[in-house]
Image (cartoon, rainbow, N blue to C red):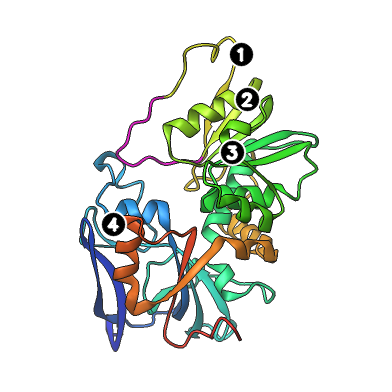
Amino acid sequence: MDSTSSEQSQSYWTTKPGHGELRTAPLPALEPDHALVRTLYSGISRGTETLVHDGRIPPEVAALMEAPFQEGTFPGPVKYGYLSVGVVEDGPAALVGQRVFCLYPHQDLYVVPVSALTVIPDDVPSERAVLAGAVETAVNALWDARPCIGDRIAVVGGGMIGAAVATLLRRFPLDRLQLVDPDPTRADLARQLGVDWVHPDDAQDNCDIVFHCSSTAAGLALGLGLLGDEGEVIELSWYGTHEPEVPLGADFHARRLSIRASQVGTIAAPRRARRTHQDRLATALDALKDPAFDALLSGTSQFEDLPNVMRNLSSGTLSALCHVIAYPGAPNPAT
């Protein structure tokens, strides 16, 4: 079988820090146990992808930050991304016509092993399904934290990951749940999610668990300050090349506080022996049946506009939680 086919695909590449473009390349031939997927939507994971766009991936963790189907290396040229929703056009008969989620970069048509695909439940809309990566991260954080009935919990940072964590936690029988963020526009987001928003100055302390998702030193210090004695911060922020100060003086030791790193690349230890990555992703997609997650989708652009979108997200002229990219042939959101 030939190693390439005559069919072409288009994909987004970060060519160098601050610059990106769409590139055309031939598709590989369809091998056994592989599938051809035509993309409907992809999502931009704003925090990580703007770090990639700006060339701020530290060399010492570059290998750890590689996406499953990344091409090229940091700082570029590199094809990067991992929130793709599409329809299987060719491959095993049981998959043809099915909507699937894949940890694939921004590309209109691609061939992958069927093991990399997760079928999307019928009652999860395709646009909402691009959040599967963020919700999977949140599921892993909850597995790390193991919240209990009656807990007092704060989520510091109302970005995509923090909002996903808060949306999952609203199902738990907690004593208190607050989404803490200095941006007053997060109040409307919290209302849509069904959780309480508070400014950092008004956040309640004596928390059992704080999920820190702001990627700022100030947010981490706030999170530690909100803990009760022997409480724990679950650290989901990733700082790229920044090295934040961590306030371990004062009463950190006297109150026996803890900081636990939570990172989606590894299954959380409390579930590692009994769950696979596919199990965790399936759990995330099942959670996305909840329409509250639509509040995390903050805009849609066309695939051909992706270079401009990335530049605007990086500069801050476009504000977004999860910005959705629509591909040719994708249904109109209104239908």
Characterize the local packing of mark 3: few (<14), some (14-19) or many (20 or more) Cα atoms within 10 angstroms.
some
4 or 1: tag closer to the N-terminus = 4
4 or 3: tag closer to the N-terminus = 4
What is the span of residues highlighted in magenta in the rendered image?
236-245
Tag 4 secondary structure: helix
Amino acid tagged 3: His
- Left or right of 310, for residue 218: right
Tag 1 secondary structure: loop
Q: Relative to 114, does residue 176 appear above or below in the rendering?
A: above
4 or 2: tag closer to the N-terminus = 4
Q: Which residue is mark 3?
A: 199
Amino acid tagged 4: His
Q: Circles 2 and 3: CB distance less than 8 Å?
A: no
Q: Relative to 237, does residue 171 appear above or below in the rendering?
A: below
- Left or right of 37, for residue 309: left
Which of pointers 4 and 3 indicates the residue nearer the eye?
3
What is the distance, in whole Å, between disc 4 and disc 1 at their CAs?
A: 40 Å
